[in-house]
Amino acid sequence: MDTLTPTANKRVVTAFLAALNDRRPADLPAYMALDVIDHNKIIHGEADEPGAAFDGFRRQLDAFGSLEMTPEELIAEDDRVVARLTVRGVHTGAHPRMPEPTRRAFEVEQIWVFTLAHGKIAEIRAVSDRLGMFAQLGWDWPESH
């Protein structure tokens, strides 16, 4: 069988979030498929190709010396897990949207939808309060083209 139960899928997502919170990017391949598709683009400028999310997560960890993703709610059905998260961080490193650290903190709510296959995260979709995050961090809102 190549799919896990909803409960097992929740455990994968919980372990994935713990790896991020513990700043263990080398462990991400244990939870994400190497060709994971990130529909959300974790970071502006992330390559539009399978597996690019690995670099996106590493860059987020580099930009935020303090980053905590607290699962407030996990809902699983079939091959999907929805996570409602409270995400907190402090901007202490270079980020494509703001190269110079502001040293300011943020706290926002995010909702992520993970699709799992073969026991790993195969797709990521997310909705985040980016306007709130940018305002708290003192970042300019990107201009539309």
Image (cartoon, helix red, strand yellow):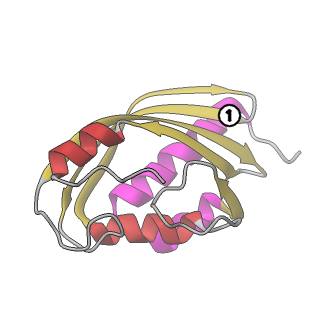
Place residue 59 in its image quadrant: bottom left
Question: Callout 1: 10 Å neighbours few (<14), some, many (20+)?
Answer: many
Closest to the observer, 33 or 144: 144
Q: Find residue 138 and report its horizontal and vertical position in percent.
A: 15, 52
Q: Which residue matches tag 1?
A: 80
Horizontal side of residue 119 vs 110, given as left or right: right
Mark 1 secondary-structure assignment: strand
Residue name at image x 26 percent, y 73 percent: 99
Q: Is residue 24 visible?
A: no
Q: Is residue 101 magenta?
A: no
Closest to the observer, 87 or 45: 45
Q: Find residue 13 and report its horizontal and vertical position in percent.
A: 54, 45
Q: Is residue 15 magenta?
A: yes
Q: What span is in magenta?
A: 5-32
Residue name at image x 24 percent, y 53 percent: 140
- State the count of labels: 1
Q: Is residue 62 visible?
A: yes
Place residue 103 in its image quadrant: bottom left
Q: Find residue 82 and report its horizontal and vertical position in percent.
A: 56, 31
Pick out the residue farthest to the left: 103
Using the image, determine if residue 74 lies above or below residue 139: above
Q: Main secondary structure of the magenta part?
A: helix
Residue name at image x 36 percent, y 69 percent: 96
Callout 1, which amino acid?
Arg
Instruction: State which quarter of the image contains the N terminus.
Output: top right
Q: Find residue 32 and report its horizontal and vertical position in percent.
A: 63, 59
Horizontal side of residue 32 vs 5, given as left or right: left
